[in-house]
Image: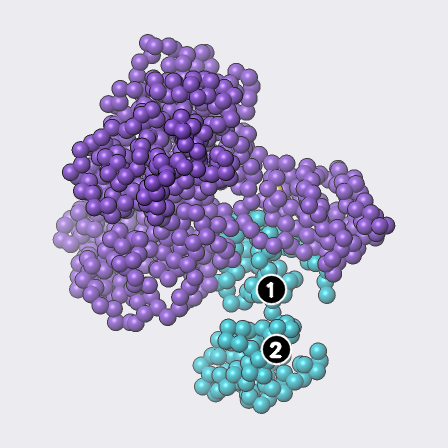
Amino acid sequence: MESPQRKFQKLQQIIDKYEGKASQLIPILQEVQEEYRYLPEEVLTYIATAMKLPPATVFGVATFYAQFSLIPKGKYVIRICDGTACHVRGSELINQAVRKELNLQDNQSTTEDLQFTVERVSCLGACGLAPVVTVNDTEVYGQMTPEEILAVVKKLREEG
Amino acid sequence: MNTGKVTIDGQVVEINGAKNILELARRVGIEIPTFCYHSELSVYGACRLCMVEVEKMGLVASCSTAPVDGMVIHTNTARVRRLRRMIIELLLANHDRECPTCSKSTTCKLQKLAKQFGVTKVRFGKRDKQLPIDESAPSIIKDPNKCILCGDCVRVCKEVQGIGVWDFAFRGSETQVSTAFNKKLSDVACVNCGQCVAVCPTGALTVKSEVDKAWEAIHDPEKTVIVQIAPAVRVALGEEFGLDSRDVTGKMVAALKKIGVDKVFDTLFGADMTTIEESMEFMHRLKNGGKLPLFTSCCPAWIKYCEQTHADMLKNLSSCRSPQQMFGSMVKKHYARKIGKKPEDVICISIMPCTAKKFEARRPEFTTGGVPDVDVVLTTVELAQMIKEAGIIFDELKPVGFDNPLGMGSGSALIFGASGGVAESVVRFVAGYTGGEEVGRVDFYPVRGIKGIKEAEIEVEGNTIKIAVVNGLANAERLIQRIKNGEAFYHIVEVMSCPGGCVGGGGQPGVNDTAARVKRIKEIYSLDAVNQVHKAQDNIYVNKILEDWFGGPASSGTHNDLHTKYTPRKRISGKPIDINNAEKGGSVQVSVCVGTGCYLRGSYDIMNKFAELIKQMGLEGHVDLNGTFCLEQCDKGVSIKVDDEIITGVTEENVEQIFKSHVAIKVDLAVNS
Ligand code: FES
Ligand code: FES
């Protein structure tokens, strides 16, 4: 893992790259999130300070977009599509199965050990494969069932 | 300019520069309901309550639609009425409807409009989620369950005060108005001015009441209760009773006596002392090459803002305490002794137009023998409530005068309540001081009025003195930037945080808009015009007390009791940014400040240098490095903290040496012991 110092330097470089322009706040947050895997409060405060913006404004933007997370995400981010096609083909059952398996409470989306995050998304644009699940936005699983998703989780656990 | 004619409800109207249909309708006597429109703020157009029908266009939001020549507008159609009702009903559905126990009851706009539009039932059930109420701050309470998301508070704080404490967070049905990271209001940059409370149409933002504390003191036979009343209260209190300001001052004193306080004194007395001390301070700085411009220090919201934002200018602030605190200090340190009481047995209640005064009274430096100089701060509205609670029919009271010796005030002190008043008082004092008896009345018009930035000049003993007067902290910031860039120079700058000055404070009655403020300003100057005591130095009681209790003005006596010091203050609480990987538990903790002040002075580079030195000297694992937000030494930055010791003035030049002598050496000691 990258050292916190490296990350901190990157943070400043990202802000510098966009000349600290308020209009570039979203791309800045995107790139910073890539570094930190989420947007820690203190990092957002730093961004606000460096960009001369009220921290409340930065917080507002960071909480508006679903792509940003203010809490650490798991190593594996499982996204379950809840678009119309996936919904009617039973994506909620998949969601429930995964959440049960990972022991996630009502408002919880990430496991205590920071291994898994489970999210619902609206339409991944692969309705023909419904219901669709992605892992870390790189692997796509179509025509999923509750049983199969558990197999995927098992496999990821084995990978560590 | 936008010109032409439109027809509104059958009336032909000249557009004549009107920016939107709403304003134009108001001109012809039609009031369109609004939640999110304020003429002083940017147009937001979110609540949709202001919808009207325009022929060929359909329904439009009148606040954000410009009138166009030939438009035919209907503001009162069946469709418009249905829509308004529906909007109000929907807002009510999501609003905690605890109206009778809400402190905004009867002044709440949502309540008022529901009545006005005949919304008598809500068909959509209740709010299902209860969010926590924030009561952390000394002045303002936030109840998110009553928020209708009009954004008025967000815009007033950003646009008028330039701070931006509030913003929208989250989205869709989850949207909230929130501070940064949903922190407590007491942990962010809020200056307690209460302008957000003044614009909030519901009970989502309210003033924290101290009425019960006041009653408790009044009913306690052991305590002597002293009241002081700020100038702007007397020109607004009448609004709470449907009266103009005639005789309000005397009735207010009478009411307080009936309520049972022991002495009713006047903050004007403190204001006259402020004028004298501040003018002397100014003349001293002028003659001895002291720090200029001199910024006034009466407004506690401005002081907090300056401490948070311009630590390098704290020396420019007048060292004078505000009139409230001069008064409090005088009561606890001198008056108490005079009447043979201990400071803790004399309770000082102040009645203020202001919410920030509640914060000011709690500042730890304003205490005597461990008790606060001002114990309770009530707003104008809170006083009105007490009068009503006591069953006093205000209108029928016979006016009574203030008590002596601290009850007399000059016209100069009175005008402290309006933007420009402090500056004018100084001008009056200096004119009398340098010109002697024959100067007579001095009315200084250029600094009067509600305008955000005013400038003026006067001649004093051959010098041209440049004065600026600002209200609204965003205006103050603009002026400060001009001063810092060398684009402008002034000798004296008066800053009041609220538009119009204290008359527009966050503690003033119900409708607290520009029109109300302008009216109160007018009343202040008419009261000043009939006041026989014109200048601060004409107040014989003030002169006598200055001599008897303090050994004269601008003396060591006044210096100790009536002046103060300021300290840099952080804007936001929070944990530091981790910089090195030392699995925590290194023997030396180093924090480099990355708060605004230090950031601008290059703390980022200092931080990197530290990280580098740690590596170079092989101290990894021994030194924990992090970036912290503000060590409250902003005027002397870059600041760092090594264990418990704060070191300021770290620069690229001395960083290595400081590292060696303050950080590395500690590791050595720890390792060798
Ligand atoms: S007042 Fe026009 S949309 Fe709110
Ligand atoms: S910014 Fe306040 S001490 Fe550094």
Q: Nearer the viewer, residue A111 or B329?
A: B329
Work out whether B416 lies above or below A117. Answer: above
The 10 Å Cα crowd at callout 2, few under 14, some 14 to 19, many 20 or more, is many
> What is the secondary structure assignment of the residue under circle 1?
loop
- Residue B73's spot in the image, x, y percent? 20, 55
Q: Nearer the viewer, residue B88 or B285?
A: B285
- Residue A156's spot in the image, x, y percent? 67, 81
Q: Which mark is residue A135?
A: 2
Q: Colour of chain B?
A: purple
Question: Quadrant of residue B459 in the image?
Answer: top left
Among numbered discs 1 and 2, the one appearing first in the sequence: 1
Q: Which chain is cyan?
A: A
Work out whether B256 lies above or below B58. Answer: above
Question: Quadrant of residue B47 in the image?
Answer: bottom left
Q: Label 1 is placed on what type of residue? A: Tyr
Residue on which disc 1 sits: A38
Q: Is residue A101 visible?
A: yes
Q: Nearer the viewer, residue B187 or A78?
A: B187
> What is the secondary structure assignment of the residue under circle 2?
strand
Side of B382 relative to A137 (left or right): left
Judging from the image, mark 2 belongs to the subunit labelled A
Q: Are discs 1 and 2 located on one and the same chain?
A: yes
Q: Please, which residue is most extreme toward the left here?
A: B10
